[in-house]
Image (cartoon, rainbow, N blue to C red):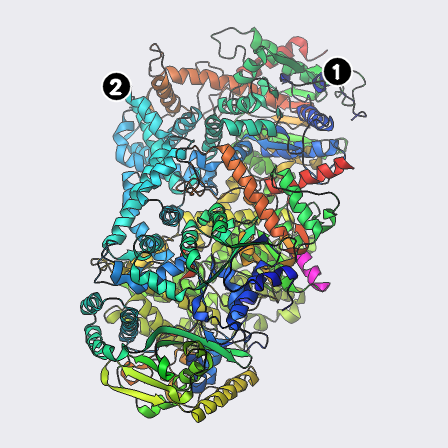
């Protein structure tokens, strides 16, 4: 690795000789690269035995592949079996590995199933609905008095189930994070002098939910982590063995570590073990919906015996952008409690790379930064941005550059996508959802299954045909031909006369296509053969049907892999619901594709989203999904106080429902009741409304960091806009106002 | 191609075939049936005789009787056996049992071999049989073969005489029974075969053997086997006797009718095939590795 | 037969000898035993006095083959049995002697339960208890729950401890989460319930067959006289795969036998999950007069034996004996780097094809995996079909209830019994018609079902009532067949409902197998129908034997149990042709117990941890419930890890000893589910490689 050019801060980290190290990095500092170098270096030092591995833990699947790829590149071809000597895992992947060591110790069968969020959501939905039917009165006391009579029924039917479900989800997450089974939680609640209603409700839902997933012989993602820790707690010999197996633990994105994650790694590392944690507390943006917190990394760095290091240099952004980002840190540091934003961002500040660095910062161009102050209606904002994007992309000077529009929420992203498409802009939206390739493969299968469940429908047949044709990239002529053939298929009134004609007749023969359009005819003959084969397979168990279809649909390994995974998931579904037939199951296939993400490492674009591949196009993404990525030009939308609140009186909060009285955040209140129940401190009592306020503050801090993440995605150009929200009452976000003030005060220029 | 679904059409020249009186009888009745049942091993679960539940009852009653008889002959005390027979939901069984106890004293003599399995080479193949009872009188070098028949009607002697069982049993006893006779093969004329009818205890049918009959049996068995060996895939013809098909499960396959014939008209009692002993090996299921 | 000197030595041992023969797999032990069996017959030993005892049916193959050949001297039939089979046979024969003492009603005959019917009764008894919260904390599917409780009963019987001690023994060894102790208590409760129910109803599951034989029959004078007279010579093969129960029987017989030959395979012992016990097998040696050993393999080339020993060393097995020198590397074939699971399947199919093209007979290839789920079997065989590779698997890729022909019969049964309230959905009716009527296409089946079937009242309406235009679309030839089927069903529904198996029999014989219907030319459909009928019939026998179902129609109970997956979840055993003409696809352990070496082995998904991990049994425990586990000792993850490494070593060595040429390792970076995999087997091979590299 001698030829690598390393910065002094990186050299310091690579000099690591063991023990615990905590590294704070800034956006663009090359965390993955540095950790990969360290992993490769540890391996090349030759101290590891054949059965030992460097364990790398990271946050998302895409990072797993990134790491694996980087390390493989850094290692020479010393080994015959590639990919050995290190193991890269997400926390869930690691938890899975640990539980798999001895599932029965924690009450699981060895082929235990992991239900994904969609199935978990469905179960929770059923459980919540059933609970609500029986216990409506318990929540009725939380309804706002202002609900008009004619809307009450609607709220009760549509809104409350959603809310109950979200309270259930929060409770379950929290309980699992605190390693409490329903039985254990029950015991805690029973110790209270008087029952707490939301906690009781949460418990009831938790117990029902857990029973339902046990019935399926399954665990959910949160169980997996809880049970991994439990396995380690129960079994010292297992810990010993794993310690031997993983003498080094490198942890990336440690700012998003949860208590359990830290606990698991702490046990694996042991008190004098080798554990390197890298993270950027300023980029901790997953706390609201999880139990993660940047506090864990910060506290770790402060522990005695931990070597604290920084990776402050970043060659990503031009100096003016760095100044903006650093100003946010300074500003937050300058605020004082009880201002919720005080200290939400923390040093290290970002430092440009030193001269001679292989990644020099782009040159200083303050004029490429637009902080757009005028008030815009939401639709106007999108129109304006659309116009600007289209214009920018047309400029020949920008052909080599990358561009992204970043939004706080998926829904907003779809609106942007629509606008851009209307303007003829080529849009890349794969980051808005699960990956497009996965989806394409699954939706093709779902089209085919959907037709097979109604084989006499010519329109479904036509769609299935198109899905099959489009499995391969088509030239525009082929596309046109496919469309013609699809139209022909869609026009068939009696499908059986095409697929199973009586001797001497049939639709194809009578259509005259053989003469008038031989190319189309050929298509239809080919499809006829296939369709007959599929129809014959329709009586097979559904997973085997999917596999049969997959053979005809796909030839790309990744697509086939998706189909295999799909087949096994759909099999699980059909076993859990034996009454489901092909019609329901074809719906499921589409459903699975949308949600199955954490374990899917199947698609190239899922694993390595590389913005550089999309020059001349516009990537639309949420800020969350943009983490770890960079573009030359970035639009940051919706910088208002709804998406980025700051604890001011005019703020509205997404978790405070209009139909709930006193602006209560029921999720937060429910959690507060649980916390009170679990606390041993007698002064820790529950007071209604307090948690709602605390949760506002937490949320505001996290959204400030999200704003910071958005800004630091930009390399050269940055545009920030805001809008007035649906009700026209929103103002620019406080942080945005501060930046505009700072910029207007002359900090835009050097 | 899944070879486990491939069915042979002719005897495998590389594999010895285990013939029994039942399979040979099937061949004699209908070559096609032999091919379907023993060469192709085709399960074809149509009814053998109607009404199906009566047919089943009949078969199960027969099996229960055979079990009781075997137990009695092995020395299980008669008292509990009688109680079992009396408690049976099928009243016919108690009657049969009563008939059998009257026969028992006659079976006390000599050495008794119950459910005796014998086998001997037959050309490149093998011939096997399981006898309900063989009564051996060593001093005289004499043997009596007993066979319990549980059919509803008593078959005609001529019909029995033509059955392969009547040919095979004495023949095989000579071939494979010398160990029962102090190392000497039984002389054919010392072998008697008795069909005893549970429903007609006083009218057993007795056949005696002779050296000539024995030689003839050997020749005709060999001829049968050679004939079967020589048949090509299409050589196994359906019987011209369409009446046979009424009691044959393959009738739909051969396009010879839909419904089964009436039980009362079935001459053969359709006893469960007793060849190689197949105990339920698979009590413990496949291991889920 | 050409025998080696060592084999000849076995054959030529004096007739009265009691021999203990041990050696590794492939050293020719069974061949020697078969030769000795034939020699005994030739020497005039009556076949009826010989018993061949094997742990499971597949291992009886060579003996059956020899006895069926004309080479065997004429005479009485040799018995080939398992210990369990022997027990069942004896209980059946001598029932009146012991029924009362064993706690049964002596006036009624014994009803032997199959695995399926035992499972049914367990479900019947345990299901109502779920509402009380039994087994709430165990994540396991219902069928495995039932089968593991049954497994405990079987273990108790085979090993010889009281059923009442199951929970206690399991609890005493438990080192995990304490909630599990409640589970063991639940297990005990269910085991007791089941046992009591069986005793009350004259039902004998496998465990009771064994127990009744062991406790009551064995010592009855009549039975021991009977056995003494009919078992004079014993050949017991693979005793290391047999249970303490079998060993106990042998131990009791040995002193009085005229001759005995016990065969012990060193390094094997794969059936420990089923109660097999190597240690108690080994102890039988002391009761034998002559010990013979066979060394060296007639099968395995030295490099493969060497590789096996090296893997053993990597797994830290003390008994592994690696020596220098052999070039094991040439005997291993690695795939190119493959990322996805289906790519691995493609690679395997392609390699097999090219082996065939270069002249390897298909029977010399085996594709092995730690376990072989239906979908995998299906995906693999599809690929082999596409390449024209002949193959054979020990079972098909669909359970009985999943077979289209069975589903058709089951749907029609629901239609014919509207009173049971098990109304099929329209899709099910479409598929049933699609199967039932010959030459109907799916579209017409759909059209037909749309017009003639209303799921609400589950009735089919006559073809004649359809609009003529639609009749024409569906065609009259289809219409006529449909009409005959409908009329048959309607006719049936008019009368008294028949037992379900009779219903199937008649429906099959009178309609579905007739010309013009789907089963007529489908020979496999006949097989499937036969299996379904047999399953329904055995179910009925078992229920009748226990005194019926108080009011509920039996057929309905059966159909519900099929839907629950309790019944008909087994596989249709198909007719097996000779093995030489097909590639064999099987779970690794099945292959081992088939005991037939091949030239090429493909180790499928060799990166999977399935090769290493014991199948988890949260309700039972093969090691804790073994005879030698000290009471009260905890089972820890150290034990688990040790046991797994030992098992993996035995597995790898066993496979290599059944390989005459080359092992092809098949793996992909990501598993089928998208996980990266680095299972212990692959890891130990990697370690062997690293060590080799380090050595230079």
Image-based side of B158 in relation to A489, left or right: left
Q: At x 45% / y 37%, what residue is drawn?
A: A104
Image location of residue C132, percent across then percent down? 27, 39
Q: Does the image show residue C449?
A: no
Q: At x 44% / y 17%, what residue is drawn?
A: A696
Residue A82 lies in the magenta-colored region: no
Q: Nearer the viewer, residue C125 or C569?
A: C125
Say which element carries label 2: loop
User: Share a chain, discs 1 and 2?
Assistant: yes
Disc 1 marks which residue? A8
Q: Does the image show residue C177?
A: yes
Instruction: Using a 10 Å C-alpha cutoff, classify the residue at mark 2 as few (fewer than 14 neighbours), some (14 to 19) or many (20 or more).
Output: few
Mark 1 or mark 2: name the one nearer the start of the chain. 1
Q: Which residues are magenta?
A: C349-359
Image location of residue C277, percent across then percent down? 47, 47
Q: Is residue C273 above or below residue B40?
A: above
Image-based side of C9 in relation to B126, left or right: right
Image location of residue B119, percent across then percent down? 46, 76
Q: Nearer the viewer, residue C199 or A453?
A: C199
Disc 2 marks which residue? A194
């Amino acid at each position: 690795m001698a030829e690598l050019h390393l910065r002094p801060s990186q050299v310091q980290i690579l000099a690591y000789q063991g023990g615990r190290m905590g590294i704070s990095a800034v956006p663009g500092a090359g965390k993955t690269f540095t950790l990969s170098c360290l992993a490769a270096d540890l391996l090349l030092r030759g101290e590891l035995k054949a059965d030992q591995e460097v364990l790398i833990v990271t946050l998302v699947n895409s990072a797993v592949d990134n790491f694996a790829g980087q390390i493989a590149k850094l290692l020479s071809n010393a080994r015959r079996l590639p990919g050995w000597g290190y193991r890269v895992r997400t926390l869930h992947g690691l938890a899975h590995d640990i539980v798999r060591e001895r599932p029965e110790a924690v009450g699981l069968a060895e082929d235990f199933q992991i239900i994904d969020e969609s199935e978990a959501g469905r179960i929770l939905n059923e459980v919540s609905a059933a609970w609500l039917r029986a216990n409506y009165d318990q929540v009725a006391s939380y309804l706002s008095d202002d609900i008009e009579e004619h809307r009450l029924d609607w709220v009760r039917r549509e809104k409350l189930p959603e809310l109950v479900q979200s309270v259930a989800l929060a409770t379950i997450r929290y309980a699992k994070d605190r390693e409490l089974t329903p039985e254990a939680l029950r015991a805690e609640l029973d110790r209270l002098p008087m029952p707490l209603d939301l906690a009781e409700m949460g418990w009831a839902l938790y117990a029902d939910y857990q029973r339902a997933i046990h019935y399926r012989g399954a665990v959910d993602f949160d169980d997996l982590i809880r049970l991994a820790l439990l396995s380690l707690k129960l079994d010292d010999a297992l810990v010993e063995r794993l310690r031997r197996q993983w003498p080094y633990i490198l942890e990336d994105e440690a700012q998003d570590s949860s208590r359990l994650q830290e606990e698991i790694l702490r046990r694996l590392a042991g008190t004098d073990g080798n554990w390197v944690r890298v993270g950027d507390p300023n980029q901790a943006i997953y706390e609201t919906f999880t139990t993660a917190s940047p506090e864990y990394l910060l506290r770790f760095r402060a522990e005695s015996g931990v070597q604290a290091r920084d990776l402050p240099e970043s060659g990503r952004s031009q100096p003016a952008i760095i100044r903006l980002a650093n100003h946010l840190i300074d500003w937050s540091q300058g605020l004082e409690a009880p201002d919720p934003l005080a200290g939400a961002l923390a040093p290290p500040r970002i430092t440009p790379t030193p001269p001679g660095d292989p990644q020099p910062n782009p040159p200083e161009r303050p004029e490429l930064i637009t902080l757009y102050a005028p008030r815009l209606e939401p639709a106007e904002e999108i129109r304006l941005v659309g116009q600007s994007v289209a214009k920018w992309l047309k400029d020949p000077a920008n052909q080599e550059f990358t561009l992204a529009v970043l939004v706080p929420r998926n829904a907003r992203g779809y609106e942007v996508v629509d606008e851009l498409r209307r303007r003829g802009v080529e849009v890349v939206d794969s980051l808005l959802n699960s990956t497009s390739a996965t989806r394409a493969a699954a939706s093709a299968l779902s089209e085919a299954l959907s037709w097979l469940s109604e084989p006499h429908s010519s329109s479904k047949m036509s769609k299935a045909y198109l899905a099959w044709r489009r499995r391969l990239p088509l030239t525009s002529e082929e596309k046109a031909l496919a469309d013609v053939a699809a139209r022909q298929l869609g026009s068939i009134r009696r499908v059986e006369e095409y697929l199973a004609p009586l001797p001497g007749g049939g639709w194809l023969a009578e259509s005259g296509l053989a003469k008038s359009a031989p190319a189309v005819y050929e298509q239809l003959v080919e499809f006829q053969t296939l369709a007959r084969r599929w129809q014959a397979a329709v009586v097979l168990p559904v997973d085997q049907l999917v596999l049969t279809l997959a053979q005809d649909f796909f030839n790309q390994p990744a697509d086939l892999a998706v189909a295999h995974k799909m087949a096994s998931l759909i099999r699980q579904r059909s076993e859990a619901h034996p009454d489901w037939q092909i019609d329901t199951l074809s719906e499921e296939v589409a459903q699975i594709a949308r949600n199955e993400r954490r374990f899917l490492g199947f698609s190239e674009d899922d694993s390595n989203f590389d913005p550089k591949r999309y020059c001349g196009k516009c990537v639309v993404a949420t800020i969350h999904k943009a983490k770890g990525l960079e573009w030359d030009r970035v639009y940051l939308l919706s910088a208002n106080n709804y998406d980025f609140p700051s604890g001011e009186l005019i703020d509205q909060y997404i978790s405070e429902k209009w139909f709930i009285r006193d602006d209560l955040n029921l999720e937060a209140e429910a959690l507060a009741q649980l916390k009170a129940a679990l606390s041993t401190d007698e002064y820790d009592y529950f007071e209604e409304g307090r948690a709602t306020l605390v949760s506002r503050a937490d949320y505001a801090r996290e959204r400030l960091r999200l704003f910071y993440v958005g800004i630091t995605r930009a390399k050269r150009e940055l545009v920030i806009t805001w809008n007035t929200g649906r009700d026209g009452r929103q103002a620019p976000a406080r942080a945005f106002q501060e930046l505009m003030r700072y910029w207007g005060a002359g900090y835009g220029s050097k | 191609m899944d070879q486990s679904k491939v069915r042979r059409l002719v005897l495998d020249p590389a594999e010895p075939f285990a013939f029994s009186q039942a399979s040979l009888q099937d061949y004699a009745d209908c070559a096609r049936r032999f091919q379907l049942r023993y060469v192709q091993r085709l399960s074809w679960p149509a009814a053998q005789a109607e009404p199906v539940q009566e047919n089943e009852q009949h078969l199960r009653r027969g099996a229960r009787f055979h079990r009781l008889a075997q137990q009695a002959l092995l020395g299980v005390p008669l008292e509990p056996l009688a109680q079992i027979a009396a408690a049976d939901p099928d009243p016919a069984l108690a009657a049969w049992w009563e008939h059998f106890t009257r026969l028992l004293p006659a079976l006390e003599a000599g050495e008794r071999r119950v459910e005796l399995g014998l086998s001997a080479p037959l050309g490149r193949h093998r011939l096997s049989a399981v006898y309900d009872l063989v009564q051996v009188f060593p001093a005289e070098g004499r043997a009596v073969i007993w066979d319990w028949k549980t059919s509803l009607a008593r078959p005609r002697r001529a019909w029995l005489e033509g059955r392969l069982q009547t040919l095979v049993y004495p023949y095989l006893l000579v071939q494979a029974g010398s160990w029962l006779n102090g190392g000497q093969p039984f002389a054919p004329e010392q072998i008697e075969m008795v069909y005893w009818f549970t429903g007609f205890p006083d009218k057993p049918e007795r056949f005696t053997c002779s050296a000539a009959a024995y030689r003839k049996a050997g020749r005709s068995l060999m001829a049968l086997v050679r004939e079967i060996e020589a048949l090509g895939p299409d050589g196994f013809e359906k019987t011209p006797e369409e009446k046979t098909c009424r009691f044959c499960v393959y009738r739909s396959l051969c396009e010879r009718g839909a419904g089964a014939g009436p039980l009362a008209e079935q001459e053969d009692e359709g006893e469960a095939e007793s060849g190689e002993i197949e105990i339920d090996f698979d009590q413990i299921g496949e291991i889920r590795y | 037969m050409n025998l080696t000197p060592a084999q000849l030595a076995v054959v030529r041992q004096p007739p009265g000898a009691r021999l203990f023969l041990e050696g590794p797999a492939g050293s020719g032990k069974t061949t020697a035993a078969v030769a000795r069996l034939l020699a005994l017959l030739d020497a005039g030993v009556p076949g009826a006095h010989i018993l061949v005892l094997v742990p499971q049916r597949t291992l009886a193959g060579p003996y059956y083959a020899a006895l069926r050949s004309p080479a065997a001297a004429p005479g009485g039939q040799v018995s080939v049995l398992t210990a369990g089979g022997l027990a069942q046979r004896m209980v059946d024969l001598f029932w009146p002697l012991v029924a009362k003492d064993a706690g049964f009603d002596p006036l009624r005959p014994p009803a032997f339960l199959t695995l399926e019917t035992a499972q049914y009764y367990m479900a019947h008894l345990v299901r109502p208890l779920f509402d009380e919260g039994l087994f709430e904390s165990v994540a396991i599917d219902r069928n495995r729950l039932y089968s593991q409780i049954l497994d405990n009963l079987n273990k108790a019987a085979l090993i010889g401890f009281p059923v009442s001690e199951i929970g206690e023994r399991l609890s005493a060894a438990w080192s995990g989460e304490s909630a599990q102790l409640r589970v063991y208590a639940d297990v005990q409760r269910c085991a007791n319930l089941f046992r009591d129910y069986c005793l009350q109803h004259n039902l004998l599951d496998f465990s009771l067959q064994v127990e009744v034989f062991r406790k009551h029959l064995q010592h009855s004078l009549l039975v021991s006289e009977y056995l003494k007279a009919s078992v004079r010579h014993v050949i017991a093969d693979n005793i290391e795969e047999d249970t303490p129960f079998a060993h106990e029987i042998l131990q009791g017989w040995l002193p009085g036998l005229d001759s005995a030959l016990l065969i012990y395979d060193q390094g094997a012992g794969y059936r420990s999950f089923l109660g097999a016990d190597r240690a108690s097998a080994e102890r039988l040696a002391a009761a034998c007069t002559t010990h013979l050993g066979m060394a060296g393999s007639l099968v395995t080339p030295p490099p493969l034996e060497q590789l096996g020993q090296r893997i053993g060393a990597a797994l830290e097995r003390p008994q592994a004996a690696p020596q220098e020198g052999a070039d094991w590397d040439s005997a291993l074939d690695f795939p190119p780097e493959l990322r996805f699971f289906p790519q691995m399947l493609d690679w395997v199919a392609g390699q097999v094809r090219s082996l065939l093209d270069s002249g390897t007979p298909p029977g010399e290839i085996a594709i092995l995996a730690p376990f072989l789920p239906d979908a995998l079997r299906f995906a693999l065989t599809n690929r082999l079909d596409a390449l024209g590779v002949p193959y054979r698997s020990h079972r098909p890729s669909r359970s009985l209830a999943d077979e289209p022909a069975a589903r058709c019969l089951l749907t029609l049964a629901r239609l014919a019994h509207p009173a049971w309230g098990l109304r099929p959905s329209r899709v099910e009716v479409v598929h049933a018609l699609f199967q039932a009527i010959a030459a109907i296409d799916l579209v017409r089946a759909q059209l037909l079902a749309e017009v003639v079937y209303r799921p609400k009242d589950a009735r089919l309406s006559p073809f004649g009532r359809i609009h003529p235009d639609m009749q024409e679309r569906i065609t009259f030839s289809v219409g006529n067949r449909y009409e005959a089927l409908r009329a048959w069903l309607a006719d049936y529904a008019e009368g008294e409902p028949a037992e379900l198996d009779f219903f199937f029999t008649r429906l099959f014989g009178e309609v579905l197998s007739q010309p013009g219907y789907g089963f007529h030319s489908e020979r496999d459909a006949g097989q499937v129908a036969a299996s379904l009928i047999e399953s329904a019939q055995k179910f009925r026998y078992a229920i009748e034997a226990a005194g019926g179902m108080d009011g509920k129609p039996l057929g309905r109970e059966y159909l519900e149990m099929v839907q629950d997956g309790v019944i008909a979840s087994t596989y249709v055993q198909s007719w097996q042709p000779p093995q030489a003409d097909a590639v064999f696809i099987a779970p690794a352990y099945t292959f081992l117990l088939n005991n037939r070496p091949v030239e090429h082995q493909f180790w499928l998904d060799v990166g999977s941890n399935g090769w290493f991990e014991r199948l988890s049994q949260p309700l039972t425990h093969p090691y804790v419930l073994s005879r030698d586990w000290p009471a009260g000792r905890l089972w820890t993850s150290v034990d688990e890890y040790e046991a797994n490494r030992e098992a993996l070593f035995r597995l790898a060595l066993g496979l290599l000893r059944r390989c005459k040429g080359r092992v092809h390792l098949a793996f992909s970076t990501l598993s089928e589910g998208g996980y990266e995999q680095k299972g212990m087997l692959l890891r130990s091979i990697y370690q062997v490689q690293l060590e080799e590299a380090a050595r230079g």
